[in-house]
Image (cartoon, grey):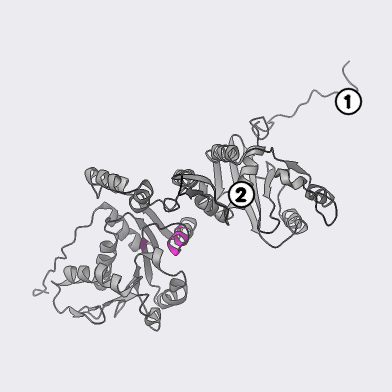
């Protein structure tokens, strides 16, 4: 070993990058959401270089995967050559974007646009998927995961938010819910990688939504005119979106928005003290009232109130009965929510959400809807007007029914009786 040569890789990770390296040592699957210019791609590439020499398996195979072949080359290829050029015996294949190490290890760059099936048939010990928000959701489970299986390979998913309707957001939710996965959001205001002067310049030259998305990793920011997005982000940061168990000591209330030609939304919640715990949800289209009543009766909850919007009093021309009357015959006694304007209801919902908790699994579609629900941009008046009617509307309307129905009275706020009353006299007072 006297002739052994020490090779120094010209890479000094900052604290956020060190956290990424630690995660890759301790977790098989890691989801890293980081602001622009945070060094996430550099961290992933340098970990592959380290892995080439520290992994105990022979002939290590690693892949860097980007949305396009051009992106893979522009983001990663120069980094790979920069950090490996001092390694004796290193070889580069410029056509295939492949780096071969002297010990038999290999890093190959792929673009999903060119040919995602090029990843098939190989095995991988480590895969870095970059800009995941732009990659199709089927690539990992159908192509990459099977290639990791036999050697129990690892995968790092990295990206920056781009709305809530893409694979990065799905992975973010999955990783948050699964303790076997690592998940971390790195915001520019917290990492210190970009100094405050530069951040101020960015704020001045970007819209608030653009800045929040690109540098504060805000999934809701890309949805222009979002109504509840900031509130949900705050609840998420506070840990109010988590795993919540049903407490049989308190009744479960439901709030409905009944779809006539589209989706019906039902949310299940408990009021404990001043806190509201949303524990379950049911959203479905194409079914009538009997279907939903049967479903909620099959759930093992002790129910309190069932709140419905005022239009439940409308008559059905087919039988002359209101839906409230039909529900009563099926065993559900609805309480009709006060008829308020949409804006009043939105205000009351915002107030309710500030003291709410959500089960991240059972209420996943509710959380997504609250992030997505947004106002329409009025081009002529240059302002946001009424909420857009789309898939999220009915879910948010059921939240609004809950908000306007709940009062600031004593229901759910009194502590349970701790001591039995024992002064009752069967025959009255003497």
Q: x, y percentage for residue 45?
A: 26, 67
In this figure, which residue is indicated by the disc labeled 2?
A: 279
Q: Quadrant of the N terminus?
A: bottom left
Quadrant hosting residue 6: bottom left
| Helix, strand or loop for disc 2 | strand
| Helix, strand or loop for disc 1 | loop
Image position of 338 with respect to 294: above or below? above
**Between disc 2 and disc 1, whose residue precedes?**
2
Q: x, y percentage for residue 134?
A: 39, 66
Q: Quadrant of the C terminus?
A: top right
Q: In the rendering, which numbered label is found on residue 111?
A: none
Q: x, y percentage for residue 302?
A: 72, 46
* Span of residues in magenta: 158-172
Mark 1 Cα shell of 10 Å, populated few (<14), some (14-19), many (≥20):
few
Work out whether residue 108 or residue 46 is closer to the camera in this orientation and state it. 108
Work out whether residue 18 or residue 339 is closer to the camera in this orientation and state it. 339
| Residue 90 visible at all | yes
Judge left or right: residue 132 versus residue 348.
left
In this figure, which residue is indicated by the disc labeled 1?
A: 426
212 part of magenta stretch:
no
Work out whether residue 308 or residue 15 is closer to the camera in this orientation and state it. 308
Furthest residue in direction bottom, as rendered: 121
Mark 2 Cα shell of 10 Å, populated few (<14), some (14-19), many (≥20):
many
Image position of 50 with respect to 366: above or below? below
163 part of magenta stretch:
yes
Judge left or right: residue 426 versus residue 185.
right
């Amino acid at each position: 070993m006297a002739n052994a040569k020490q090779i120094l890789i010209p890479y000094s990770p900052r604290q956020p990058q060190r956290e990424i390296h630690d995660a890759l040592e301790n977790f098989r699957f890691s989801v890293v959401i980081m602001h622009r210019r945070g060094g996430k791609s550099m961290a992933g590439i340098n970990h592959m270089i380290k892995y080439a020499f520290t992994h105990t398996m022979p002939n290590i195979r690693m892949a860097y995967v980007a949305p396009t072949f051009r992106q893979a080359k522009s983001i990663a290829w120069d980094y790979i050559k920069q950090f490996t050029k001092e390694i004796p015996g290193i070889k580069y294949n410029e056509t295939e974007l492949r780096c071969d190490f002297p010990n038999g290890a290999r890093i190959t760059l792929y673009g999903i646009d060119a040919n995602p099936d090029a990843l098939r048939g190989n095995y991988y010990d480590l895969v870095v998927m970059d800009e995941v928000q732009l990659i199709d959701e089927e690539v990992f489970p159908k192509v990459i995961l099977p290639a990791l299986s036999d050697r129990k390979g690892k995968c790092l998913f990295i990206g920056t938010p781009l709305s809530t309707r893409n694979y990065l957001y799905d992975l973010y939710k999955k990783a948050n819910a699964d303790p076997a996965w690592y998940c971390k959001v790195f915001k520019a205001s917290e990492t210190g990688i970009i100094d405050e002067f530069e951040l101020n310049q960015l704020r001045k030259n970007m819209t608030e939504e653009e800045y929040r998305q690109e540098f504060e990793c805000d999934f809701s920011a890309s949805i222009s005119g979002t109504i509840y997005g900031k509130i949900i982000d705050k609840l998420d940061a506070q840990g109010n979106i988590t795993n919540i168990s049903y407490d049989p000591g308190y009744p479960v209330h439901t709030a409905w928005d009944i779809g006539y030609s589209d989706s019906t939304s039902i949310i299940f919640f408990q009021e404990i003290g001043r806190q509201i715990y949303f524990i379950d949800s049911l959203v479905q289209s194409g079914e009538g009232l009997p279907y939903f009543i049967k479903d909620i009766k099959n759930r093992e909850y002790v129910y309190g109130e069932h709140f419905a919007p005022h239009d439940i009093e409308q008559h059905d021309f087919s039988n002359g009965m209101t839906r409230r009357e039909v529900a009563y015959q099926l065993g559900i006694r609805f309480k009709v929510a006060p008829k308020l304007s949409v804006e009043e209801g939105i205000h009351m919902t915002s107030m309710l959400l500030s003291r709410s908790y959500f089960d991240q699994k059972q209420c996943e579609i509710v959380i997504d809807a609250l992030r997505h629900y947004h106002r329409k941009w009025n081009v002529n008046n240059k302002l946001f007007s009424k909420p857009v009617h789309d898939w999220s509307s009915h879910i948010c309307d059921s939240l609004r029914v809950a908000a306007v129905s709940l009062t600031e009275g004593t229901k759910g706020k009194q502590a349970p009786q701790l001591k039995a009353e024992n002064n009752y006299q069967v025959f009255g007072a003497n």
